[in-house]
Image (tube, coloured by chain):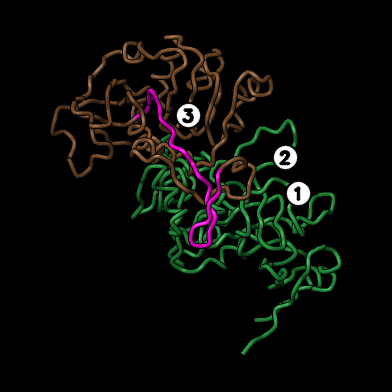
Chain colours: A brown, B green
Amino acid sequence: MRPVVFRDADEAVADIPDGATILVGGFGTAGQPQELIDALRRHGARDLTIVSNNAGNGDTGLAALLAAGQVRRIVCSFPRQTDSWVFDRLYRAGEIELELVPQGTLAERIRAAGAGIGAFYCPTGVGTMLAEGKEVRTINGRDYVLEYPLHGDFALIKALHADVAGNLVYRKTARNFGPVMATAAACTIVQVASVGDLGTIDPEEVVTPGIYVDRVVPIEPAEPGVAA
Amino acid sequence: MRTVEHADRGPLTREELARLVAADIPHGSYVNLGIGQPTTVADYLDPAADITLHTENGMLGMGPTAQGADRDPDLINAGKIPVTELPGASYFHHADSFAMMRGGHIDVCVLGAFQVSQDGDLANWHTGEADAIPSVGGAMDLATGARNVFVMMSLFTKKGEPKLVPACTYPLTGRRCVTRLFTDYGVFLPGPDGVRVRETYGITFADLADRLAVPLLALVPTG
């Protein structure tokens, strides 16, 4: 279905139910859709599963969602950072579940979900504690671990610019997980610095085709010259 | 090639070690430098060596750390430090970035380590302590996927225990993946029949063999 442009982040996330699995873009704060996450926090959905590379930085964005007690489980590759005190406290108190996934396996599991792949054999992690309990198969003399796709009910991502067809371009390393997460959720919600008419993006430069995008929310960048 | 002993000097400083690793990276390579000490290798790469740096958060052609007004929150490295882009740089998403690793397109990665075993197992992501918060990031993907896995570390812990060991006691990052080990006391080539010593610094081969519990093999000239 063609995407819908929302003028208000709160309206764009208003139907996210308790218990939803949500793919959240970003690598640290680069590409993190902070205003959409803030809207989700205000909306108040609870018992969420969050799939994201990190587990929040400082006290804003994803960290604030965790601090509000809305997240039951997080699937990520790198929760521990110098400014991950919110996650650290919840984890040590047993108040959040963690599924730790190697970063490339996390990206590929999301990609597989968006591409209709049932499962895949991956060499990463063979012989380590992150492969414990998983099927291992030897193919052409090399061992691989069976990994399953990671689907989202919703994806919250950030891009630089969209057109009204939902085509997206990103900015520098803020692209990170956005393009794969956009493909892997039943409903993909994108915050962008600007939305243009059809034809404002050169088709050769589209990174995420609009077929993957359900909702677009234009949000003015907080600082002049810096993408929102 | 034969084992070269540099016993008439001290062990390598961290800067000398970074310089040695940099000099060992083949011209024209695509290289991923891990977070921490490996990042400093970039400071010693010869600009004429035509080396392209990969950062797993989605960029090839990464330039030096950004300063002042050039700092851009959308342009960071894997350690989340603001960096710059060089002419010819490219951006791509995370699944592509890690396909480059697993697919064998990254020539060399340089990683730090808690321990390396004699046959090249790597432990560098988790201390295994009960209250530690495990974080793996891209360490396992790099260890498994890069064509050559260089490790740089001190050879001994602060308590004097060897970090080149018969078998890792810390949780593994990857099995039999380390191709070259650079330490303050020497450069080692792990393998199934023992660890070849390419060169030593501040110690003789014989003294090194005394201090380590792994079988050391001297390189002998061939041909």
Residue B169 is tagged as 1
Mark 3 residue element: strand
In the image, is residue B119 above or below residue B75?
below
Using residue A10 as the reference point, say whether residue B102 is left or right of it. right
From the top left corner, tell me how far across and down residue A139 is, in percent.
49, 57
At 31% from the left edge and 21% from the top edge, which residue is drawn?
A220
Chain containing mark 1: B
- The verdict on residue A152 being magenta is yes
Q: Which residue is mark 2?
A: B128
Report the front residue among A133 and A8: A133
> Label 3, label 1: how many angstroms apart (C-alpha)?
31 Å
Mark 2 residue element: loop
In terms of secondary structure, what is the magenta stretch mainly?
A: strand
Q: Determine contact: label 1, label 2, CB under 8 Å.
A: yes
Q: Which residue is mark 3?
A: A51
- The verdict on residue B65 being magenta is no
Q: Quadrant of the C terminus of chain B?
A: bottom right
Q: Which residues are magenta?
A: A135-158
